[in-house]
Image: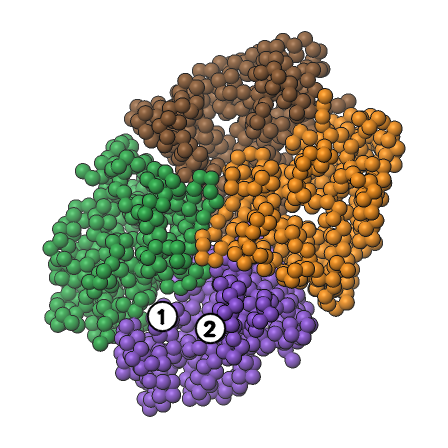
Chain colours: A purple, B green, C brown, D orange
C-alpha cells in the first residue's frame, strides 16, 4: 500500500551536512522512505547514527559490499530501489559502478568520479544497466533556474550572445595563507582531491549550470588558474574563457580566495533581445533585462512561470524556499523517473552532466599547464 | 529503538499547502514520524491521501473523535504523542481542548481559537494538562529573527525606543473590488472568519513578532481599520498605534490591499544605541544600523550568531534556507520540550502567544469601532 | 545678450550646506546668474564669502533692507529678478513678504513660515504681487518622483487605495538622550523652532510629497507624537493617520530617533491596479508592483518615462544623478515661470504647498495634544 | 577680486551631454568661471549656443587656432587659464598638444588620444610645459571610490590577491545586429574610432579604475575580444586576463552587448584580509566583506571615511550625490593644482593615466589578434 520509494544511503552520518540535505530533500514530496544504508565506516557509529535519525537498524549494513549482497537477497518488492552516494569523492566511482551493475538506481553526489576516464567507464556501465542515474548539481533544482532555462528555450531573450558565470567563495583564505595548513589539507592534496581544487569543486557547478540554462555546449576553453603560492599544488582560483560549439563566447570565474564571499554563485546570460541574471544567495529572484525597458523581477510560484518552474515551488509567492527545496526538487524528478512517470529533462542532472563535468575539469587544468592555450573539450 | 516522536495530523490533506509545510518541517531534524491522523473529512479522500503520502492507513481514522478514542486504547508507548491541528480555524479550539484534556501534546496552527474567551478556556485546560502546547507563528523560527531577539536581549541596541512592524500583502484585491466576491468569501464573512480579516490573519503575526523580538509587552492600542466598501464587513487593511507597558511607542501596519506586495513582513526595532531590520522575503539578512557607523548585514550560520540562532541553521553561510526551515526549527523546539530536553523559551511560540494574539485582535477591532480610541489590552 | 536670470541670495554663507545646494542647483541648466545678496549678517564675513565664491562684491549688501532699497533703485533690466531665502526659519516670512510686496520673485526654503497665520498672510501678499513664488520641497524634483506623479495621474495604478509615507532619521539621538543637550538645542526649543521639531522638519516633506504624487488632498489627521522625555518640549518622532478628502486612508511615519537611519524617506502608494514605491536614498529606482506580475523597476532617462520626468534628467540611463540634480530641476521650473514659458504644475512647489504644510503641522500637534483625536486640516 | 579660474571650453555645444556635465562640474565648488571657447564648428551655432548658456560672446572664437592666438594676446591675468577639451576623439591630441605648448592648463576628455604614440608625444610635451593636465576618467571622482583607494592603501583589506572589474552595457545591440547600421556607425569604423570600440571606450575605464584603487600596475594581458559578426571590424565585447607586475591576477570584463545593462561598472578587489565592492549605478555604497564577519556597507559623508573621500562629499549622509558630483570633484582637484594648493594624487587622473590607457588598448587588441597570447604592457 505504501508506495514510497525505498532509499538507501551511503555516507552522510555523524555531523555530515550533506547527509541532512539529502535526508530532508528526500522527504519533501513524500516520495522516498529511507530503509537502510551504511552511514559511517565504524559499526558503532553507524548504528548509533541510524538510531539517532530514527531509521530501523535491521537494514543498516557493516559496509557497502554487504549492503549490496544482502539487499540482492531480498525480493525485488522489498529491496532498496535507489542509493544515494554521499561518501568521500574517491568512493563515488566504485560504489556507483557496482550499484549500477547490480540494477540499482543511483543518486550520486558531485564530483561524480575523480577522473574523466572513470566517468566514461561509468557512462558505459549505465548504458547497460538502464537504471536511473542522477548527479546532484544541487543548484539546478531552484525554481528560478528552471524558469531561466525555459525562458531561454522559449526565445524570450533571443539568441544567446554572451555568458558570464561567477562562483566566488572566500573560505580557503585561512588555509592557503598558512604554509603548514596548505601542505596538510586534503582539498589541496592532489593524491586525495584529484587534479583541481577550485575548478573541480565549484567551477564544475558553473559549467554545468551554464549548459543547463542555455542548453548550449561549451566547445573550447582557455584558463588561467591561480595557486597563489609556489608550494601549493592545487588551484584555489581561476578564470576560464570559453567558446560554445555555436561560437557564443563566455567565461567562468571561480574563486575560493574571494575574501568575504560566502557562496556567491551568479549566472548572467545575455541574448540578442534580453538578459537574465540570477544569484544563488537570493535564489527567489530572477532578473530580466531589456534595453530601454524597466528591469523585471520574476519570483517563484507565480502563474507567469513555466510548468517546470512551478513544479519546483511548494508555497505561494512571498514564502521563500531555499537550497533544501532545490535539492528536494531534484529528488522529486528522480522519483518520477524511477516510477517511470513522465518528466522533463530539466528535472535532474544526469550521467551526461557528470561526464562533461569531469572532462571540463581536465581540459581546464590542461589549458593552464600548457600555458593558457585553447583546449577543445569535445575531442 | 526508533526514538522518533509519534505525530498525528488533523487536516492538511488534498492540496493543502499548510499540510506540506508541517510534514516537511516535522521531518527536518529526524525527530518526528507521522503515524496517523485525519487528513480529510471524507473517508475515501482521507485514505487515498494517506496512501499518496506514504502513511500506513491502519491509524488513519474516520474522524477526530475516533482518533482520540482509538489512540487512547493503545499502550502509551505506541500512542500518538503529539497532534498537529491544521483544520479550519473554528475547529482549532474544540480539537485542541479535547486533545489536551486527554493528555496529548498539541501543535496548533494560528489563529489558535476564534475568540479570546476560547483562548482563555484553552489556557486553563493546558494548565491542568501540563503537556506541551505550541502555536505555529511560523516566522519566529527564522534564524535571523532568533538572532534579533538575542541581540536585543543582550543590549546590543540599547533600550528599545521605537517599534515599526509592517505586514503587507495585496492578494485580496481581486476579491474586495468585486461586489459579489466580497459578499461570498469566507474570509470576509464574520460568521466564518471571526471578527477580523486582516488584523486576525496577519496583524497578529506582526503583534506576536514584536513581542517575541523585543520581549516587551504591548499595553494599549489605537487602530484605524479599513473596510474599503460600506457593504464589506471585515477589515482588509489597518494601522495600529500602540504603547508598550514600559511606555515605548510603536505601530503595526497590516494590509491585504497593498497591491503587488506578496508577503512583505518587515520588522524594524530602534534602540538607543542601534537599530535592527529584517524582511521576511529575504529572511537570511539582518541589518544592524548605528548612527555614524557602516550598516552591518548579519547572515545565518556564522559564529557571530547566538546559540539560539545557530541551532536553527542546518548549513554553512551562503546556503539559503527558507520558510520550511523556519517551521522546522519550531518543530525541533517542540521535540525538545516533548522529550523534556532543555530548550530556550524562544524556540517555539506557546499558549501565552496564542492567548495574547486573540486579545490583541479583539482590542484592535474595539478601538476602531469605538472611534479610534485607546484600548488597554492587558485589562 | 546674456539672458541669464539675475538671482540674489539671502543667507547660505560660511559653511552653509543649503547655500552650496542652491548655488549648484541654480547653475545646472545655465539659467541663473548670482548677482548679489546678503550671505552673512557680519559685513566682513559677507564680503569674504562673496569673494570666496567669486561673486562681485558691488551688489553684496550689508543687510536685507538695504538690498531691497538699493536694488529698487536699479533699472528693471538690471535689478535682481528672483531672491532665494536661505536664512533661519523665523526670517523666511518677513523677508518673503517684503520681497513680494516689492515685486520680486521668491524662492523660499522650507518651512515657509513659522505659523499657519503667517502663511495665510503671505498667500494674500502673493495674490497681489503676482510674481513667482516657490518653496523648496527639494525631493519633488527627482525624476522618478515626477514619473510617479504622472503614472498615478495617468491611471497606471488605478484609484489610489492606500498611502504609506516614511521619513526616518536617527540624528537626534545624541541630543535627546542627554539632559543638558536637549534643554539647549534650538531645534528642541519652541521659542526658536516653532511648535514642532520632527513633524515640522521632515513630516511636512512627507505630507507635501504624498499630495504631490497622488494629487489627492489630506482631509483629517490623527497623530501620536513622541517626546521621549517629560522635560522635552518638542516631538522627535510621530505617526500621523490620515484620511484624504476622498476617503482614501494613509499614514505618515516620521522619526528622528530611528537609530542608524540617515535620510530614509520612502513613499509607497497602492492603487487598485498596481503599487508604486520610491526611496530617497536610491532615488533613481521606481518600483511598480502588480499582483501576479513581475516587479518592474523604472529608471530615469528612458523613453518610457513621462516628459515631466525626462525634463529632469540630464544624462542617459545608468549615469546616476542625485539631490543636487533634484534641486536643479526645481530651479529649472522656476526659471520657466519667471520667463513666462510654459511649464507643468509639477515642476516646482508653490505657495499652496507652503500654506498647506504649515496647516498640517498645526493640526498634527493639535491632534496629539487633544488626546490623539481627529482634526480636519481643511477647516 | 574675483578669484575664479578662467575656463575655456572646446566642444560641448548643441545637445552635447558631455558639455552639460563639464559645465555643471566646473561650477560645483565656485572655482571656475567659463569665459570663452569654441562650442560648435559652425559660427552661428557657436554664438547662439553661448547665448543660450549665458556666456558673453566676446571671447567665443570661430575656431581653435583663433582661440589660442587671441587669448595669447591678452594679459596673463585675463587669459583663459585652463581649457576643457570635449571635441571628437581625434581632435584631443592636436588640441591638447598646442594648448600645452602655449602654456595652458588642460582638462581632456578620454580617450586622451587615438594612439599610444600620440599619447607618448603628449606626455613629452607636458614635461616641457609644466602646466596642469587632467584626463577625465570621471568615475574616479566618486567619494566611495576614493574611500576604496584609501582603505586599500591603509591595508584594511591586506595584500590584494584578486581583482575583478566589470563594465557592462547593452547599448550597441540595435546597431550590431543590423548589417547596415554596423557598417555605418563611426564607433565601429576603425578610421574614425581607432583600433577598439568596447575596450577603447569602457575597458579603459576599468583598467584605469583598478590601477587607481589598488595602486598596483598591470603587467601583462591576455584578451579574447568579440566582434560578433565577421564583417564587423571593431570589438563590442571582450574579456582581459591580466597579471599585475607584483603577480596578482585579475580580469576585466567589458561589453556593449550585455543586453539590458545600462552602465554597470562594478569593481571588486579581494585582499588577504577583506574584500571591497562598488557599483557605479549605486555609487554611494561601498561594501566591505570579511570572512566570518557581517558585511559592512560604507556610505559617503560619514566621519569614518578618509579625508580624500570626505573632500568629495558636499552634503551629510543620506543625501545622494551622483555622477555630476563625481566630475565636480575632479574639477575641484584640478583647481587646487592650478592654484598650486596642496592636493592628493588621488584627486584627478593625470597624463600617466592617459598614457597607460592608450597602451592598454593597443596591447589588448594585439593579444587578441595574435591568438589570445600574453602581451606585456610595460615593454
Left or right of A179? Residue C115 is: left
Q: Which mark is residue A136?
A: 2
Quadrant in which residue A15 is drawn: bottom left
Quadrant in which residue B335 is drawn: bottom left
| Residue D357 image offset from top left, x and y in percent | 73, 52
Instruction: Reply above or below: D299 against B139.
Output: above
Q: Inspect this view and state whether residue C346 appears.
A: yes
At 46% across and 73% down in the image, what residue appears?
Answer: A136
Instruction: Reply above or below: B266 against C311.
Output: below
At 61% across and 15% down in the image, what residue appears?
Answer: C43
| Residue B175 image offset from top left, x and y in percent | 37, 47
At 24% across and 62% down in the image, what residue appears?
Answer: B336
Task: Give neighbour class at mark 2: few <14, some 14-19, many 20+ (Cα, 10 Å).
Answer: many
**Element at badge 2?**
loop
Q: Which mark is residue A15?
A: 1
Quadrant in which the N terminus of chain A is drawn:
bottom left
Amino acid at each position: 500500500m505504501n508506495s514510497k520509494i525505498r532509499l538507501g544511503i551511503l555516507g552522510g552520518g555523524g555531523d555530515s551536512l550533506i547527509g541532512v540535505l539529502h535526508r530532508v530533500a528526500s522527504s519533501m514530496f513524500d516520495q522516498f522512505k529511507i530503509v537502510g544504508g551504511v552511514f559511517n565506516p565504524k559499526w558503532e557509529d553507524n548504528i548509533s547514527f541510524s538510531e539517532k535519525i530514527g531509521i530501523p537498524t535491521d537494514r543498516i549494513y557493516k559496509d557497502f559490499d554487504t549492503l549490496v549482497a544482502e539487499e540482492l537477497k531480498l525480493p525485488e518488492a522489498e529491496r532498496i530501489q535507489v542509493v544515494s552516494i554521499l561518501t568521500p569523492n574517491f568512493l563515488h566511482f566504485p560504489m556507483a559502478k557496482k550499484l549500477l551493475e547490480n540494477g540499482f538506481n543511483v543518486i550520486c553526489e558531485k564530483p561524480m568520479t575523480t577522473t574523466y576516464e572513470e566517468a566514461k567507464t561509468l557512462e558505459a556501465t549505465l548504458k547497460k544497466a538502464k537504471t536511473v542515474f542522477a548527479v546532484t548539481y544541487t543548484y539546478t533544482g531552484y525554481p528560478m533556474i528552471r524558469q531561466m532555462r525555459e525562458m531561454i528555450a522559449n526565445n524570450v531573450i533571443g539568441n544567446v550572445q554572451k555568458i558570464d558565470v561567477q562562483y566566488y567563495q572566500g573560505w580557503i583564505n585561512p588555509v592557503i595563507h598558512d604554509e603548514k595548513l596548505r601542505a596538510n589539507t586534503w582539498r589541496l592534496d592532489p593524491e586525495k582531491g584529484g587534479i583541481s581544487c577550485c575548478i573541480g569543486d565549484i567551477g564544475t557547478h558553473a559549467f554545468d549550470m551554464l549548459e543547463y540554462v542555455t542548453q548550449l555546449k561549451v566547445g573550447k576553453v582557455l584558463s588561467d588558474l591561480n595557486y597563489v603560492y609556489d608550494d601549493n599544488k592545487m588551484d584555489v582560483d581561476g578564470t576560464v574563457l570559453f567558446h560554445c560549439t555555436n561560437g557564443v563566447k563566455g567565461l567562468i570565474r571561480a574563486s575560493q580566495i574571494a575574501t568575504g564571499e560566502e557562496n556567491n554563485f551568479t549566472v548572467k546570460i545575455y541574448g540578442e533581445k534580453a538578459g537574465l541574471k540570477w544569484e544563488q544567495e537570493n535564489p527567489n529572484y530572477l532578473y530580466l533585462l531589456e534595453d530601454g525597458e524597466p528591469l523585471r523581477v520574476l519570483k517563484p510560484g507565480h502563474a507567469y512561470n513555466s510548468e517546470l518552474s512551478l513544479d519546483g515551488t511548494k508555497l505561494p509567492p512571498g514564502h521563500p524556499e531555499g537550497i533544501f527545496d532545490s535539492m528536494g526538487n531534484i529528488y522529486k524528478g528522480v522519483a518520477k523517473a524511477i516510477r517511470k512517470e513522465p518528466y522533463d529533462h530539466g528535472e535532474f542532472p544526469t550521467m551526461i552532466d557528470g561526464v562533461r563535468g569531469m572532462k571540463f575539469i581536465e581540459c581546464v587544468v590542461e589549458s593552464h599547464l600548457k600555458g593558457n592555450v585553447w583546449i577543445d573539450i569535445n575531442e
